[in-house]
Amino acid sequence: MTKRIGEVILSFTNISLSFGGVNALTRIGFDVKEHEIRAIIGPNGAGKSSMLNVINGVYHPQQGEIVFRGKARRGMNTYESAKSGIARTFQNIALFKGMSVLDNIMTGRNLKMRSNFLLDALYWGPAQREEIAHRKKAEEIIDFLEIQHIRKTPVGRLPYGLQKRVELGRALAAEPAILLLDEPMAGMNVEEKQDMCRFILDVNDQLGTTIVLIEHDMGVVMDISDRVVVLDYGKKIADGTPDEVRANQDVIDAYLGVAH
């Protein structure tokens, strides 16, 4: 069955970002379409993490325009970015290690909760009904990611691959329109990578979530991505399908370390 990819949901035009005179990104432009898996790749120091930080409001570019869902986005911080429908996982796992899998995933529902402090304190009426509804959603994510057997286990006791899956679950709990994945396969063995690939594809296919990912494993990127943008020294050197990018001489030179 042909994958249904929609219209542009997020676009960047002439994005430039610098720190103390050092250019991290220079006039970067590309777009992301609904329901696609969009990869950002490049050698170390290419500007991939800086680009991801621009997307979710950690960094504000000095130049350029970001348009999300048809509206220009200026000065959006991380909270506003999350509220607007952009969720993220991190290269270094950012979970509450002493809390259970279920409770960690429940933290991803915070932006969806509406009851006030007094009702929460009393755990009465609307607050109780709301928590039951949010817990049901968390349980659905646990089922989706096939981690029912560890739902009550403290995250700190889990092997690395399962911790990464829990972090994915926490991001999904926010029901994002766009999910940013920062090196989701980093540090994983072959079996763990295969599992994570399967869940990323399921999230994209079954939940319809648009995914933007950074990943160093080129085999993974070329297998699961719809389109790939390639950065090198903060500049865009290629953008296209995996086959187009794979055959691009500038990309080959960048990864082989050919002098610029």
Image (tube, rainbow, N blue to C red):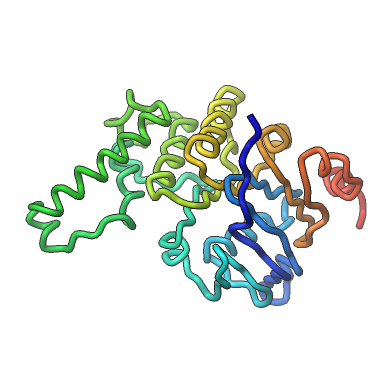
Which quadrant is the C terminus positioned in? bottom right
In the rendered image, the quadrant that contains the N terminus is: top right
What residue appears at the point 42 percent right and 31 percent down from the top-left corner? 145
Residue displayed at 52% across by 49% down: 179
What count of labels does the image hold?
Answer: 0
Side of 120 relative to 137 (left or right): left
Q: Position of residue 87 (x, y in %)?
A: 47, 53
Q: Is residue 160 shown above or below 131?
A: above
Looking at the image, which residue is at 67% across and 40% down? 225
Q: Quadrant of residue 219?
A: top right
Q: Residue at x 47, y 69 (%)?
A: 77
Left or right of 112? Residue 39 is right
Quadrant of res 37: top right
Nearer to the camera, 204 or 70: 70
- 239 vs 92, nearest the viewer: 239
Judged left or right of residue 212, residue 114 is left
Q: Position of residue 203 (x, y in %)?
A: 50, 37
Q: Nearer the viewer, residue 207 or 246?
A: 207
Q: Estimate the x, y position of residue 236 in percent, counting from the top left.
A: 78, 59
Give percent across and percent down for residue 220.
Answer: 67, 33
